[in-house]
Image (cartoon, helix red, strand yellow):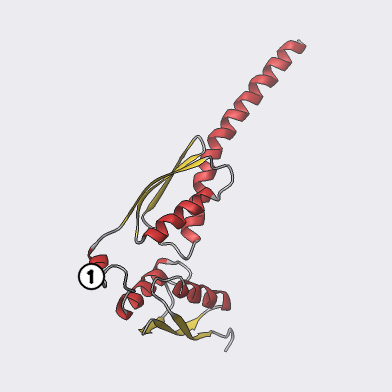
Amino acid sequence: MRKNAFAILGALAFAAFTVACGESDLGITTKVKSLLETDRSLDARQIQVRTQNKVVTLSGSVPTPTEKEHAIAVARSVENVADVVDDLSVATGAMASAQAPQGSPPDDTSITEAVKQKLQAQPETASESIDVDTRQGVVTLSGTVKTSQEKDEVLQIARNTQGVQGIEDRLTVATVGS
């Protein structure tokens, strides 16, 4: 009788271990996706994440080599990740070829558009009416946001945009009950 109880407990423990290992891949994938999507210095919309045996595979495309390296570093930072396979490509579309020659900084129009796109990509800032203007690499942000945290997010998004030399903050925080 006692042998049967130990056998049953052993089988249950093995089953629980097997399920836990399967869930850990799902948990790792979920954690990596969440970190990539909330990282304001990344445009993670085109990044796919798969995990098998604690090895994370990143695929899809990112706008810059810097974002590619950052996405890989984010994935490596997640607990229980054994390795990261890099299947990411750097987008080389019309926007990239329309920019200034290699090695020179983006022009003001490109910077303004990049900041606007990043703001629209974030759920917290997409609905806000924020004006973006760039002169000699200095981005001026104006408009009204709901909270000081949202204001900080907008400023961080602009700061993390390639080519930005400085920020002029003209954002105001809406007052509740006014």
Disc 1 marks which residue? 98
**Which amino acid is tagged 1?**
Ala
Left or right placement of residue 105 versus residue 171 in this view: left
In-front residue for pair 31/9: 31
Residue 174, x across and y down, in percent? 54, 84
From the viewer's perspective, tell me whether residue 147 is left or right of residue 43.
right
Measuring from the top left, give residue 129's x and y in whole percent.
41, 80
Q: Is residue 12 above or below residue 71?
A: above
Considering every residue shown, the one lying at the far bottom of the view is 178
Residue 44 visible at all: no
Query: Which one is in front, 144 or 103?
Result: 103
Hey, which residue is sitting farthest right in the picture? 2
Where in the figure is residue 55, as x and y percent of width and height? 48, 39
- Residue 52, given in percent of the width and then of the height, sits at 47, 36
User: Mark 1: which secondary structure?
Assistant: helix
- Residue drawn where x is 58% and y is 83% of the image: 176
The residue at 41%/77% (across/down) is 164
Q: Is residue 33 above or below residue 160?
A: above
